[in-house]
């Protein structure tokens, strides 16, 4: 033990890059958002209100982190953004004081280092109890991410939790900062010619959800369709262990090469990456105990079903009708491929293969900022819908309400199954709210079309309350174009039917051959055709 040191004394603070400090502040902001939601009584409406004082503070916290990461200082940027946010000077001072105390440390744990160095690259007196090496930061951020995922109800088994806490995601997205690598958000890695993302590292919460569905066991053989970065395959490799094996496929050579490099960097040895059309599967390694698709499918490729071992399980994000998709677990029971569960989920579609499920873009405004992202095979008169949102608006409110944080996912599926066009995803910028669109357009699969008419779902605060006095939001249908009043009435009627007859009930799914026996059509039963097979959707 060197002179001047004793057991139990705080060590001298290490010098650390300002950018690394910025990453920590950004992570704290992510954690503080959860605290903020609790402080607001679970009312997510306020999280979208830029005028709420707590939301302003959270936003400024993010600005602090970003300025440190990108510029290495706060001198020019923090006062500017604080002023723009309209925060009073006394609150700016208080927030700065709190930020210094929380992130930098205080009291006996804060001291001033005397080493020389560039002020732009480092800061003095950082509390090394909370700021250490990049590897330690990665582990801390990874564990915080898994804690968040579990709080959301995923990573329910010890095996999935252990995989997520062990496999270093940042090694699979090496160009992303740690704050992005361990945010519960996708990281885009490849784009097509028009700037649309065509491959990404999936949102970790969704990855955990699908691994829960997969239920992989040690020693099993797994086939993954859609290698992406290789992160999902590495997690699956952790689940099956050294006696198991994972084969992951992707249609792009560059993605497969990147996956191999990432797996090597992470020390993963039981995963093989192969360039192949995912819809063909990988017969060389069949049969598989589990097959998981991390790309969206419409029809289910026959190879996936044929390459499963008896008792095997398929987990796939399946686009059912319109843009509505669910991650469905299929197993064969008594010769029928039936679902054992499903979760709301959407993935990038299969492409460049025999089961492509491409998208087309249909502008609804003259500048193209509000547009439909429709299945490419869907018949839509794009010329008739050009600038349709400039035409007079019709509204029909349904009386159907939801609570804060209540997902209307089953309503969305029922309505989509009930309409010829289904419900189609509509993309729009925030500036369209309250101008081209209503104040609160529904952000998921929302639009229906019929010739030159388009409708979309919207919400408004209801005058009604929950039994506990909480807020309720009412769903309505907004229409534009000739015949939009009749189309809006159809959509509203489907919403009311779901609310009256099927609310609180879930649907099951079955893969049916195109040449299978005739199925009786009755209320609550839908038969959805694809080029490969049919999907039978039944409400119970």
Image (spheres, rainbow, N blue to C red):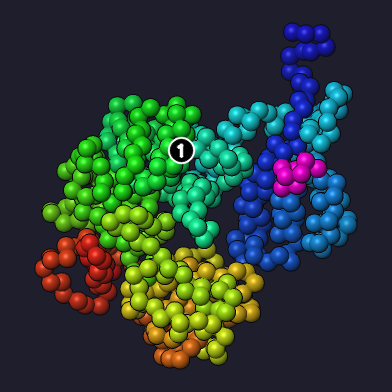
Residue drawn 78% across the image and 8% down it: 2
Q: Residue at x 71, y 47 (%)?
A: 66
Above-or-below relation of 493 to 21: below
Decide if residue 159 is in sight here: no
* Residue at 25% from the left image edge and 49% from the top image edge: 280
Figure quadrant of residue 177: top right
Question: Residue 482 versus residue 23: which sits nearer the camera?
Answer: 482
Residue 120 in view here = yes
The N terminus is located in which quarter?
A: top right
Q: Quadrant of the C terminus?
A: bottom left
Residue furthest toward the left?
Answer: 517
Foreground: 272 or 346?
272
**Residue nearest the observer in this picture, 297 or 419:** 297
Looking at the rendering, the stretch of residues picked out in magenta corresponds to 65-73
As drawn, 454 above or below 219: below
Horizontal side, residue 217 vs residue 145: left or right = left
Left or right: 33 with respect to 161?
right
Instruction: Tell me where residue 300 appears, x and y as whole percent.
Output: 26, 57
């Amino acid at each position: 033990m060197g002179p001047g040191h004793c057991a139990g004394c705080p060590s001298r603070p290490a010098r650390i890059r300002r950018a690394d400090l910025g990453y920590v502040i950004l992570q704290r902001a992510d954690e503080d958002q959860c605290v903020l939601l609790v402080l607001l009584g679970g009312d997510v409406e306020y999280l979208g209100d830029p005028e709420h004082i707590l939301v302003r503070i959270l936003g400024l916290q993010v600005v602090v982190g970003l300025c440190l990461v990108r510029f290495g200082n706060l001198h020019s940027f923090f006062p500017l953004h604080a002023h723009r946010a309209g925060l009073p000077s006394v609150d700016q001072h208080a927030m700065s004081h709190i930020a210094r105390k929380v992130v930098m440390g205080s009291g006996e744990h804060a001291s001033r280092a005397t080493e020389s160095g560039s002020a732009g690259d480092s800061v003095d007196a950082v509390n090394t109890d909370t700021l250490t090496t990049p590897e330690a930061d990665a582990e801390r951020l990874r564990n915080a991410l898994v804690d968040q995922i579990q709080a959301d109800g995923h990573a329910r088994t010890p095996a999935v939790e252990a995989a997520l806490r062990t496999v270093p995601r940042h090694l699979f997205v090496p160009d992303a900062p740690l704050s992005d690598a361990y945010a519960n958000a996708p990281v885009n890695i490849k784009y097509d010619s028009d700037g649309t993302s065509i491959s990404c590292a999936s949102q970790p919460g969704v990855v955990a959800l699908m691994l829960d569905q997969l239920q992989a066991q040690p020693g099993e053989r797994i086939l993954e369709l859609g290698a992406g970065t290789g992160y999902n395959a590495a997690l699956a490799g952790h689940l099956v262990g050294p006696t198991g094996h994972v084969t992951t496929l992707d249609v792009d050579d560059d993605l497969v090469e990147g996956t191999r490099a990432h797996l090597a960097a992470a020390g993963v040895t039981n995963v093989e990456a192969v360039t192949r059309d995912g819809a063909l599967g990988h017969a060389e390694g069949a049969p598989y105990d589990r097959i998981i698709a991390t790309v969206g499918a419409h029809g289910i490729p026959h190879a996936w079903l044929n390459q499963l071992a008896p008792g095997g399980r398929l987990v796939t994000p399946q686009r059912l009708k319109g843009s509505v998709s669910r991650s469905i677990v299929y197993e064969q029971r008594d010769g029928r491929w039936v679902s054992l569960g499903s979760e709301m989920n959407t993935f990038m579609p299969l492409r460049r293969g025999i089961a492509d499920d491409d998208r087309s873009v249909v502008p609804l405004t003259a500048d193209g900022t509000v547009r439909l992202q429709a299945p490419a095979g869907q018949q839509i008169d794009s010329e008739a819908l050009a600038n349709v949102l400039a035409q007079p608006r019709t509204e029909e409110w349904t009386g159907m309400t939801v609570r804060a944080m209540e997902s209307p996912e089953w309503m969305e599926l029922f309505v989509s199954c009930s309409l010829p066009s289904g419900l189609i995803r509509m993309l729009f910028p925030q500036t369209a709210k309250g101008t081209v669109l209503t104040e609160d357009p529904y952000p998921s699969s929302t639009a229906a079309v019929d010739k030159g008419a388009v409708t979309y779902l919207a919400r408004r605060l209801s005058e009604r309350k929950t039994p506990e006095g909480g807020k309720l939001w009412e769903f309505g249908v907004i229409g534009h174009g000739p015949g939009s009043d009749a189309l809006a009435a159809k959509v509203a009627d489907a919403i009311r039917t779901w609310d009256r007859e099927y609310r609180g009930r879930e649907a099951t799914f079955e893969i049916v051959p195109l040449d299978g026996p005739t199925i009786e059509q009755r209320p609550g039963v839908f038969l959805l055709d694809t080029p490969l097979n049919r999907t039978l959707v039944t409400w119970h």
